[in-house]
Every structure is written in C-alpha cells, then in structure tokens.
Image: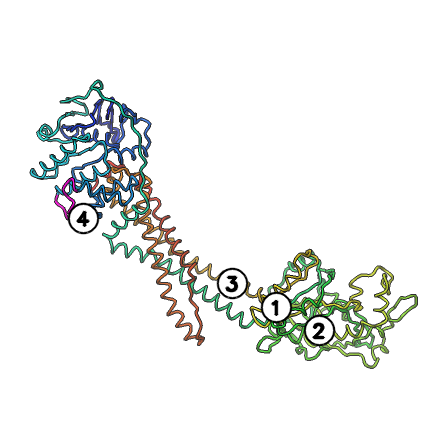
Amino acid sequence: MLQLVKIHKNYVMGGYKQVALEDVSINFRKNEFVAVTGVSGSGKTTLLNIIGGLDSYDAGDLLINGKSTKSFLDRDWDRYRNHSVGFIFQNYQLIPNLTVLENVELGMALSGANSGEKKKRALQVLEKVGLKEHVKKKPTQLSGGQMQRVAIARALANDPEIILADEPTGALDTKTSVQIMDLIRKIAKEKLVIMVTHNQKLAEEYANRVIHFQDGKLISDSNPFLEEDNYKESGYSLKKTTMNFLTALKLSARNMATKKFRLTLTVLASSIGIIGVAIVLSLSNGFNEFSQKEQKKYMENYPVKIHYKTVDKDATEKLNNKKIPSYFSMEKEVIPKKNQEREDGSITFDSNYVNKMDKNLYLFIGSSYQTGMNLIRKTAQGVGVVFDTSGLGNQSFQKYFLNKEGKSLLEKDYSLLAGKYPSSADDLILIVSQANELDTSILESLGFGTDKNISFHDLLSTNIKLVPNDLYYQATGSGKFALKKVDEAMFSKPGLRKLRISCILRLKRGRTSKFEDGLVANNELTKVVHEMNKNSAIVKAQKSSKEDVINGQAVQSEKVNSLVGIEGFEEICIIPKNGNSRNKIISYLEAWNKGKKSKDQVKIDDNADEYKEDMIKVLNGVTMILVAIASISLVVSTIMIGIITYVSVLERIREIGILRALGARKKDITRVFNAETFIIGASAGIFGVLIAYLFSFPINAIAIRLSEIDDLRIAHLKPLHAIFLIALSISLTFLGGFIPAKLAARKNPVEALRSE
C-alpha cells in the first residue's frame, strides 16, 4: 500500500513562498485506477512527482508498504523509481536516437537485466500494447498514439507496482485517446495507476476513484481507502540499480551519430596534439635506433678495459668534482697547477683468467705493465737530473687502439697541441687539462721549476734517457742499496735508451678521458722496462726482504712495483670482434667479481656504452623539449573538449530527465557523458596515431633521398608509444569533460523533463 501522511511541499522563488501541497494524506490500494484532477497550479503534478520520487517533500511522510521514506538517500529514490514506479508522460519522453525496442529496454538496462532477458520482456510488453511489428523503428517514425504506447510499454517493462501517468492523452486526438485510456484501465486491474488530468469527464468515465485538488489541498476523494479496509502489510525492500559502461557508450554513440559533422571536426581538432607528439616520438625513436645502429657499426671494436688498481675514492671524487674551465687555452705553454694527491693500492688478479676467454670473441688482448722507470735528463746547464717516475707505468697507450678506419683513438679523442703523434715505443705523450694546466709534481719530476709557465717547445726539447736498475742502484752491504751518482758519466753510458716527449695532447670537448693528465708511455716500453729490471740485483734483494732495501722501512707495495718487483698488469685492453662479442666479454669479466668484496673487484671500463648513454640522454632531452612544445595543442584540445561536452549537456537535458525518471543514479548520468568523452578521446587518439604512422612513409622517403642511405628509417612510432598516446588522448578528454559531466549529474530531474 502507498500512503501519503500529512505531506507539505513549498517552492521558494526570489523570497516568495508558493504552497504546492498542504497537509495531504492519502492511502492508495494495491490495484486501482486513481484520477487526480484540478486546475493548473492546484498541486496535482507536484503530488505525482513526489509519489514518483522525482521531487522531495518538505514535511510529512511517504510510506511504501509501511516503510517510511524519510531516511531515503538519493540512491534509494533511484532504486525506487527504477523498480517500483513506471512513468507515462504527456509528451512521451522517448529518446529519439534509440529504436522502439531500445527505449523499452532502457529501464531494464538500469536494473542490471542481461541482454536476453531485456529483449524478451520488451517484446512481451510491446506485443501487449500492440507494437511488436514496430520494434526497429525510431520514435520519429511513429504516430502520437504509437509513441504513447511505447511509453506505456517502457513503464510496464520492469513490472512496477505503481504506474504514474501525467496527462497521458493531452497530446492525442479523441480516437487515440480512447484507445490509450482503455489500455491504461486494463493495466489498472493488476497495478496501482495514478493519473493526473484536467479533464474531469475523462476521469469519471475511466477511473474508479477520483481525487480533486485545489490550491494544494485535497478537496474530495470519491473512493477513499481506510486502513481498516482489511489491508495486510507485506513489507518493502529496495533492489539495486546500475548502468554499465556499455549502455552508457550506446546512448552516447547514438546521440553522437546524429551529429556526425560536429563529431568529425571535434576528433580532427583533438587529434592535432596527438599527431604532433606522435611524430616527435616517431622521429626520436628513428633517430635513436639509427644512432645506436651507427654506434654499433663504428664502435663495436671499441676496447673494453679492466683495471685492478684500487683508488682512494674520496680523493678521486674531489679530483673529479673540481671546477673545470669552460674555455680552452690558446697559449703555447703549460701552467703549473697543484692538484689533489691520490694514493693507490693494488689487488691480486690472475691474467690467465682473461687468456682463457673464447678467442672468437676478440681481435686482440693487450696488457699494460705496472712498473716504474729510471729516467734521467740532461738540462741546458749540462747537469744530470733524477726525477720520480714510479707512477709513469700506471697509464700507457697502445698502437693497437685503432678503429675500423685505422685511425688511432688518441687522434679521435685528443687534440694535438704541439709535436707529432708517437711513432715508436720510445715516444712519450704529455697530456694537459683544458686550461693547459699540469700538476706541479709532474713538472718538478721533469726538472722544471713551477714558479712560471713552461713553453711547449721546452717540454718537447727535453732530453731523456732510460737507465736499468743495475746501473741506477749500487749495493752498500748488509743487503741494502743506494742510488748511484747521477752525472754526465751516467748520462753518457753507451747503450742507454733515449726517450722523448713526442707530443702534447688535450682532451677534445665532449670526449671521455682515457688517461689522467701527465706523462703517458707506450705499453711496449713498459714491457721492455719490466723485462730489463725484473732480474736486477735490487729486485732480487727486495723480493727476499721484509724491509725496504733502500731506506730500511716496512715494504710498501708501490715501492716494490716501482722496482718491478711483481709481475702483473695495471690494465688489460680487449678489442671485441663485434657488439655481441662485447656483451659476452663484459659478462665474462663480471663473473670474476662475483662473490668478491668491493675492494677486491676489478674495474671494468666500457667507454662505448658511456658514449651511447650520453647520446641517448641528448636525444631524450631534445625529445622532451619537442614533446613539451607539441603538448600545448593537447592542453588546448582538452579545454575544447570541456566546452563541447558542456554543449552536449545542454542539448541532452531532457534525456537526463528521462534517465533519472527511469531510475538512473547521478553517477550513471556522469557515466553517460564520460562515455561520450571516451568515444571522442579514443577516436582522436587512434586517428592521430594513424596519421602520424602514415606521415612516417614520406618522412622516411625524403630522409633516404637526402642521405642516400637505403635502409634509413628516421621516423618509427613504437607500438607501446602508440598505445600510450591513445590512452593519453582518452585521459585528457576525460579530464576535459569531467566538470560538464558532474554538472549534468546534478540537474534536477523535474526541470530536466520540462526542457525542450
């Protein structure tokens, strides 16, 4: 039983209060045909809207089978309208984009019925109202009476307990009105039918109960229903209502299909940003792939080096972080500069581990011996000078450092400031900083003062000779040794190897340093020194002594190394056959470090990968800038989508009212407009990606023609990027349509139904 208990409803407009219903109490039977009459403004339509849950009451209560609705939330009223109430409107309120069948199915779609069940029930009620043969037609293809029959069928589809009819024959001719009234009277035998009409004669002819309203008050009731009329309460429960995204998509797609031209323009405008970003990404991908391909081609034989000499990390970090001048010196002289000193230590490494590597992986393996050199210099004054070269063997170049064109990597990475590139093992290299600075300790060891700059000419004119250990040291007894007198006689000894500084080099801008600033010897020279000194008297004595044979202090590894007291290497250089070989070589070398402590691990240098990473960083940076520029159009299209969605909301207000009358929740209305933005976003994204893909063909063709590289593919959009861009387009359109969709959900259903 439906009960209204002391219902009050007022409308306030501009400070003026209009009483719509005042102290209205009515009980309705489960099955009866009730006609509510009265002049316009008497409150009858407000009564119908309150009973249907489209409007709220200010005071009193509405009871459904004894259940109060005072505590009903929005979702409870939505469920009530969907399952308990069926509406028949004067102007039919059908959605013109849907077929007759789809209009009838709509209410069931909100109740969660499956497609088979919806169609079966819709056909049954359409047959009941005599429209089974018109199921595929659109409402605009039907007469007024037929459209009202569709509305009746829709009201009956969910099998509600209550049918609410608002002037159901107001827009029909007399003959059709009779047919509709006969149909409604037939329905009233099974359900409660409440009809609002201003036609008193029609009400008395068809209804078995007539209620008359005037000025918001119940004036008369021809057949009142009292509680004592043997009514038995049966209870009432609310069923869940929901609209799935597929239904929302169908509604939006049908609506947009009627505005094809506008949809096309919207998609085109929205896709411009996607096209721009897609082309930028495709060019970036193409350049990246081409760059990596070329790097692999020209750098696959770039050496892999391993070191097993530990370095003071704090000192190294300070050295690496020092401020380097942004300019290159143009002077033909070297500037003395005091730098951070570093103390190095050695670890144990078995060079045979490298020699056991698969010979098919490399072209050449070269080793840099760890040794010191006894070098003396004759100055212009004719005085022999001794200088410390214990660290000279710690960095050496190799003639095998050649790329495929036979060009030395020294020539590739370093600028020649003075002299000529080395042509023999007796040629030394002097490397200076960008500002032509050189550590004072190196200059002092070469016999130069550090109070003024030294010209390149003076450095290249340095006269140097290599002295074996047995000529450089003499035994003093008790297993001790001392340095012999360095004089003209030592310098003039026959057979001494003559050395010279052949050139002065400086690292080119943007290149990775292979050596520290200072003297660099050829690896062949370090091998000669090692073989020459390993069996000398001082080395034999040092190997068997726990003390330094020169000063009597505890033995230091660096001192032993300077005397060639160990047979080992400072560095091993491996030239891979190709890029795949490079990866296998690195994996093989990394296996040595596995399980060892950090201090006991060898250091693996792969400068080719560092170069690749630098190139990738540059390309990524350029890509980000271009994408940012192209993204401006995405922002514009997002704003445009918001405007278009808002226009669509204004155009579909009546549809919003119909959906709310059928039980659609606010979130369902939001979902309908989200579905519309989804269609636009997906279409724009797919279209943009497709256009960008088609653009890649002429771009690549032009690039091939200009570069004359047959396999050049400079524009290549990755599938993952295409998917990302489509998802981005959908996300941005969702964002643009978010506020208009929320505004649509907040529309008052009664006002929405009244809109045209």
Residue 705 at x, y percent in the picture:
41, 75
- Is residue 704 shown above or below 145? below
Query: Disc 3 versus disc 1: distance between alpha carbons?
Result: 23 Å
Q: Amino acid at mark 4?
A: Lys
Left of 384 or right of it: where is 250? Answer: left
Disc on the earlier residue, 4 or 1: 4
Mark 1–mark 2 CB contact (< 8 Å): no
Q: Residue at x 57, y 66 (%)?
A: 611
Marker disc for residue 618:
3
Q: Nearer the viewer, residue 522 or 98?
A: 98
Q: Residue at x 91, y 68 (%)?
A: 476
Residue 382 at x, y percent in the picture:
82, 77
Marker disc for residue 328:
1
Left of 356 or right of it: where is 253? Answer: left
Residue 74 at x, y percent in the picture:
32, 33
Residue 132 colored magenta? yes
Residue 63 colored magenta? no
- What is the span of residues highlighted in magenta in the rendered image? 127-143
Mark 4–mark 2 CB contact (< 8 Å): no
Disc on the earlier residue, 3 or 1: 1
